[in-house]
Amino acid sequence: MIALLSFIFLLIVFIYIKSPRLSENEPPLVPYTIPVIGHTFSYFFNTENFIKKCLKEYGEPFNIIIFGRVTTVVAQKYIPEVTKAHENFDSFEVLKELAPFHFILDHNPFDITDFHAKTTREQISGKLSLHFDKMQKNILYCLDKWIGECNEPRSIKPIWNFTNHVTAKLIANICIGEEASQHEDVIHTFAVLTDDMNRFFFLPPFLSFIHQKLHEFVISLPFLIGFSPIAKHKKILINRMKPVVENRIQQKKILGDSYKPSVDDILEFYMSQPDFVPSNVNYNYFADLLIFLIIVGIGTTGKSLANLLFDYAGRPEYWDELYEEASTFNKECNGKLALNDINKMIKLDSFIRESLRHTGDMIIVPHAVTTDHYTFSNGYTIPKGRNVFDFSEDCLFSESQYGPDSKSFKPFQFVSQNISASKVDRNFVIFGGGRHACPGRFYAVLVLKLFLYHVILKYHVRTENGNMPKKLMVGPISNPPEESLIFEQRKEI
C-alpha cells in the first residue's frame, strides 16, 4: 500500500513538474487529454489532419505538446517571418537535439556551420560549370553499372538505395577528387553513412517524455561505451584521402610558387585554409568535415532523386513531352550537353520543381529560438529554446498560389512563370528561405536535371502496376515508395 501511494505521489509530482507553464502572451495551447503525452500521438500518427484541424480552430501560430515539451507550430502566414528572422532562430539547434554530433565526431560541426555553408556555396554550387562534365560522366557510369542495357525489362529495387549511390558517386568526386573517389569502399561509405547513423539518432524521442537529456543520453550510449557505427567509414575516408593529400604536399614542395592544383575539389579547399599545417595534417579533422557534408547532403539529394524517378515513372501521360524536349536538345548539341543547354530545358525544370513541391514532408526546416524571446508580428511571444515547427504543406499546397487543385501534380505549371526549380519563395519552402536557404540547392537541382535527362534519353521507366505508388510516412516525414521500378532500353526510332 505504501509503495502504491509513493508511486502515485511521485507520478503527481512528475506531472506537475512537466506541466506546461506559458505566459499570457503566448500562442494558444491546443487542449489535450493526457498530461505530459499531450498531442504526441495525434501529431506523430496523423500529422496532416491534426495540424489542419488546429489551424482551423486556433489559427497560427499555436502551441502543442509533443514528446513532453511545448512546441510552437507555424504555417503559411508565419513561416516566411521565421525564416527571415535569422537573428532570432536557428535550424541547427533542433538538429543538435536529434543528432548530438559531439559524441560521434571529434570536432563539433555546429561550431563551424558558417564554414560548412561557405564550403558548399563556393566550392559546390559556385562551381557548377567546372563540375558539369564530371557530373554527366559519373551519372552515365552509375546508369551503366546499376541499370545496364536492359534489352529486356529489368526490375530495380530499392530505388532509394540506387539513388543514394548515384548521389554518393557525384559528391565523392567533388569532395575528395577523381583519384580517391574511384574506390568502391569510398562510394559505399558516402552512400550508407547517413543510414548507419540514423539507426541510432533519428528515433522518436519517447524518453523525452521524462527529460530531453535522457533521450540524448540513451541515443549516445553506444558511443560512450566505445561503439560507433561510423568509425569504419571514418577510417575508409582517412585511408583514401591520405595518399592524395601527401602527394599534393610533395608536389607543392617540389614546384613551390609555381604549383597549381590539378584538381579543384573540397579536399584542395581544406588544404588551402590558413590553419592547414603540411607537416602535421589533421586527417581526423578533414574526415569530420566530410562526414558532416555527407550527412546533410547525400540523404536529402538521394531522396529527391528517388521521388523524381517515381514521379516520372508513375505518370506516363507526360513522357512524350519530356522526351521531345530532351531529344531536341540532345540533337542540337550533338550529344555534348553543356550547362547552358540544360538550363534551357524549361519543361524538365518545371517537372523537377513540381516533384520537389510534392516531397510529402509535412515539417521541413524546424527552428529554435536563440534569443531571449521572439515576438511574432501579431504580438504573440515565445521564449528562448522553444522549437518552432513549420507546417510546410500549407505553403506548398497553397490554393491562393497553386489554385483549387493545388494537390494535383501539374508538372508544367512553372513553364510560363519562368521560375527555376532552385528558386525559393514564400510558397516554395523546400530549401528553407531567407539568408539561410540551403546553399547547395543549385547543385542538387542540377543533379536532378542531369539524372532525369539521361534517364529519359536512355530508358523507358514504369512502375510495377502502372500507377503512382504512395510515399511512406514516418510521422511528419515522408520516404520514397518501396516498390520496384521497371527499366527497359529505349529503342531508337
Image (cartoon, rainbow, N blue to C red):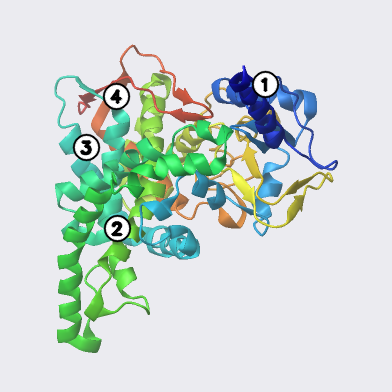
Where does label 2 land, which residue? 174
The residue type indicated by label 1 comes to Ile
Figure disc tally: 4
Q: Secondary structure at mark 3?
A: helix
Q: Which is more N-terminal, label 2 or label 4?
A: 2
* 319 horizontally vs 10: left or right: left
Q: Position of residue 444 (x, y in %)?
A: 41, 47
Camera-nearest label, 3 or 1: 1
Q: Residues within 10 Å of mark 1 (few under 14, many from 20)?
A: few
Three-letter amino acid code of the residue under disc 3: Leu
Task: Give the CA distance from mark 4 to mark 1.
Answer: 49 Å
Please identify the quadrant where the N terminus is shown: top right
State which tag comes first along the sequence, 2 or 1.
1
Please report whichever mark, 4 or 3, sits nearer to the chain's N-terminal start: 3
Amino acid under disc 2:
Ile
Rate crowding at label 4 as few (under 14), some (14 to 19) or many (20 or more) other CA atoms within 10 Å.
Answer: many
Q: Is residue 49 above or below residue 359?
A: above
Secondary structure state at the residue bearing disc 1: loop
- Foreground mark, 4 or 2, reads 2
Q: Which mark is residue 461?
A: 4
Residue under the image location 55 percent in, 36 percent down: 208
**Mark linked to residue 143:** 3
The disc, 3 or 1, on the residue closer to the chain's N-terminal end is 1
Dots 2 and 1: beta carbons under 8 Å? no
Residue placed furthest toward the top:
465
Residues marked 4 and 2 touching at CB (< 8 Å): no
Can you say whether 290 is above or below 207 in the image? Answer: below
**CA–CA distance in space, label 3 to label 1:** 52 Å
404 vs 420: above or below? above
